[in-house]
């Protein structure tokens, strides 16, 4: 026949003291079990803490990967814009060359026209000074 007594210890925890038919005290065995339970609880707390840290690192890692993907997309957009700008620059260069050539010929034609006008004016002045249609007797 076993008798279980509930006894309050100094730490305000209740300890069960079992007295068996052999007259032995099973308190030591209970204390060992309680110590193992405390170790197990401490390990569980440590595991939970580590799991929380791992979860936090996983969230940070996912955030970093998302930001990295966004950065990659932005770089792709930037590269597309650079390619587009390169095409526009090439087109601008070709157009500028054509315009330059056009105005170069236009300026040459204006210069030739100016020379012709000046020669015509000089010819008219010489013609009016000499007056070949009038006879000099």
Image (spheres, rainbow, N blue to C red):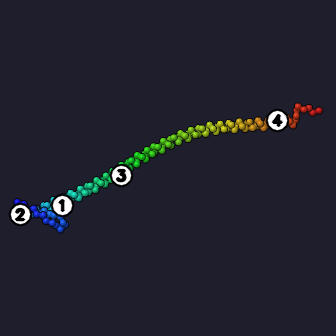
Residue 2 visible in the current orientation: yes
- The x and y percentages for residue 119 are 79, 36
Toward the bottom, the furthest residue is 10
The picture places residue 44, in percent across and down from the top left corner, at 23, 56
As drawn, which residue projects farthest toward the right?
Answer: 137
Q: Which residue is mark 3?
A: 60
For numbered disc 2, what is the local secondary structure? loop
| Residue 126 lies in quadrant | top right
Check residue 123 in the rendering and tell me which mark sits there, or answer none: 4
Residue on which the image places disc 2 = 23
Residue at 5% over, 61% down:
21
Q: Quadrant of the C terminus?
A: top right
Q: Between 86 and 63, which is closer to the camera in this rendering?
A: 63
Spatial CA span between label 3 and label 2:
60 Å
Q: Is residue 28 visible?
A: no
Tell me the residue at 51%/40% (across/down): 84
Q: Which residue is mark 1?
A: 35
- Mark pair 2, 1: CA separation: 24 Å
Residue nearest the viewer, comparing 122 with 34:
34
Image check: 79 left or right of 55?
A: right
In the rendered image, the vertical position of residue 108 relative to residue 36, given as above or below: above
Q: Earlier in the sequence, mark 1 or mark 4?
A: 1
The CA span between labels 1 and 3 is 37 Å
The answer to whether the residues at label 4 and label 3 have Cβ atoms under 8 Å apart is no
Viewer-nearest of discs 4 and 2:
2
In-front residue for pair 31/14: 14
Q: Say above or below: 125 vs 41.
A: above
């Amino acid at each position: 026949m076993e008798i279980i007594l509930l006894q309050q210890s100094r730490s305000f925890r209740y300890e069960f003291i079992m007295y068996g038919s052999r007259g032995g005290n099973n308190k030591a065995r209970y204390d060992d079990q309680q110590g193992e339970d405390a170790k197990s609880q401490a390990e569980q707390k440590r595991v939970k803490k580590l799991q929380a840290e791992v979860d936090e690192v996983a969230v940070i890692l996912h955030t970093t990967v998302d930001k990295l993907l966004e950065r990659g997309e932005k770089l792709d957009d930037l590269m597309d814009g650079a390619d587009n700008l390169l095409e526009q620059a090439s087109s601008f260069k070709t157009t500028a060359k054509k315009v330059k050539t056009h105005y170069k010929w236009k300026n040459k034609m204006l210069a030739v026209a100016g020379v012709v006008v000046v020669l015509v004016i000089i010819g008219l002045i010489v013609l009016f000074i000499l007056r070949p249609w009038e006879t000099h007797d």
